[in-house]
Image (cartoon, rainbow, N blue to C red):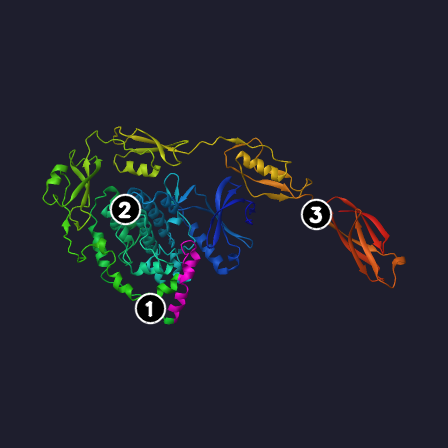
Amino acid sequence: MDPYIGKMLDNRYEILELIGRGGMANVYKAKCHRLDRLVAVKILHSDLAQNADFRRRFMDESRAVAQLSHPNIVSVYDVSCSDDVDYIVMELIDGVTLKQYMERRGQMDWREALHFITQIMWGLSHAHSRGVIHRDIKPQNIMVLRDGSVRVADFGIACLADQGQTLTQETLGSVHYISPEQARGDRVDARSDIYSAGVVLYEMLTGKLPFQGDSAVSVAIQHLSAVPKAPRELNPDIPEALELICMKAMCPDISKRYQTADAMLDDLEKFRKDPAVDMDYIREDLKAAVVCQEPTQPLPTDRVAAVSRANSAVAQEEEDKKHSRKVVGLVIGGFALALVLIFVVFKLVAGGFDAGNGTASHQVPNLLGKTLEEAEALPEVKDIFRIEVLGTKPSDKYEPGQIVEQDPASGRSRKNNLVIKVYLCAQEDDTLMPTVVGKEFLMAKTELGNLHLDLDVQRAEAYSPDVPEGQVMQSSPAAGEPLNKGDTVVLTVSKGPETKPLTVPNFVTMHIDDAAQQAEALGLTVGEHQYEFSDKPEGTVIGQSIQQGTEVQSGTQIVFTVSKGASSAERVVVFDIPEQYRSDSNMKIEVMQDGSIIHSTYVDGGTASFTYTFHGSAGSTSTIKLYINGTEAVAQEITF
């Protein structure tokens, strides 16, 4: 049984249940009795609390996150460091991790990925502006709330930028998301967080990680030397500009990567306003990035051998941060192939590198302002490109029926994937409400935002026995009805099946087994019991956390207080042995309490006294007797 569940910390935080485990601490759901709210409490592992280094790192996290206050970062309410327990009190998030969300959704629509990465970068921008580097950005540390907003969580290995700590002194981030400089064990800064965020964006857009391997070591090496597939090669629906943003964030040359979160946010905002925006300047940066890369310096042979032996110990790094320390030594050693392979990093995105396969390259023509018929009749389109119409968008610049947006943008070169996706200018009244029923609220809201009508999208909620929780079950206006600029759209989201409230009965005086069985039959969840001494028989319920007559939802937790029986007391009695019982031979001593012999022994015949400790319930009385050689020698009554 968890030692903290049911306990009260600092006479304020009642620990209710375990909700997460980590390499340094466990996270519990708790109730703050002072402010009457639910919170999350992160408690340092008791064995680590004895280690001054772990304790320092735990409090470093406290100091780091205490500086931060931002809607895209999990809030910290309180910090406590004492001889008994070290803990941090944080905002309790009603949501799931981005990792869980991706596992459920699979490959995301690029619009949804844009929504998430923008919020992640807002949070990182704030943290970096306060000198705090996260160093473990990954989907498991990103929380997605029910309303679609995002919180960056778990600054468990964060550091203050001005402390100058290097990775070899601190915990390594999860290997699938670490930057090349982290993998080498170099000093890290805000740009390492940007690289990790780029990997998260890559995974959202493609449904795959850029690098996979049989071990943490092999994955870390790939961050230094391998070429990730271009996102559009895995998912052609991704706009080219968003692909370029992703690959710039993941650029292995730290000097060519986004230098700040704000710089990446600027490009994300440009793309949001115009998905067909020309970002050739990113392409040029990526071309320059592959020209010169410094080789990784090798380790001495004895250190390389030692690292090789660590390989098996890091295989589970993704689940436990502490395993990933094993990676550092190996990657610092590096490999000569890093210099060769890094030369072609991002060639699929940067362009200008001829694969030598003889495939002809075609330049994308400018289709803006042309009708579909005019575009398809162009010599540079006919028999070369296929035009795919994605829908209509309003425009003040073009006439109805003309192309207002294209992807890829004109001037790009293509050897394969010869499809140009376009939007046509909408008629004044021909923008219709799309079908969003059955979609997640966030995805539906993103889809409506891409209509560029400045719609006021509002959320309503209702119970539904058929529509899964979180999905849109109804829209107003309905699908197919006209939409105008500035219209209000109400999306009704399912809350899942309605659960009728139940009335909590009185469990006091029942035996705990019967009470627990009845509570579960009613639909309540029975928490860890609390035990107290009382005048009630042992096992009797003497208290319940929810008052009789209270209406609660099914699944609500109830905690019972159970009697341990009367509190135990003891009484030390010194018996004087009458002289007539003393002799030269040994004496047999027997002690009786309330008619039962409870102790028997032999003592020296000349013993003048005998001491014994009696036990009983507090406030009770007992008749005690001392027998010597089978004869009653002393009798008296005692009170506990």
Task: Categorize mark 1 by other alpha carbons within 10 Å: few (<14), some (14-19), many (20+).
Answer: some
Q: Which mark is residue 298?
A: 1
- Tell me the SS state at disc 2: helix
Q: State which tag comes first along the sequence, 3 or 2.
A: 2
Task: Categorize mark 3 by other alpha carbons within 10 Å: few (<14), some (14-19), many (20+).
Answer: few
The answer to whether residue 363 is visible is yes
Residue 566 in magenta? no
- Residue type beneath disc 2: Leu
Q: Which residue is the site of mark 2? A: 268
Q: Which residues are magenta?
A: 302-326
Query: Which residue shows up at 60% across the image and 37% down it?
Result: 515
Q: Which residue is the site of mark 3? A: 568
- Residue type beneath disc 3: Ser
- Tell me the SS state at disc 3: strand
261 or 631: nearer the viewer: 631
Query: Which residue shows up at 52% across the image and 31% down it?
Result: 502
- Residue type beneath disc 1: Pro
For residue 116, what is the image quadrant? Answer: top left
- In the depicted structure, whether residue 176 falls above or below residue 387: below
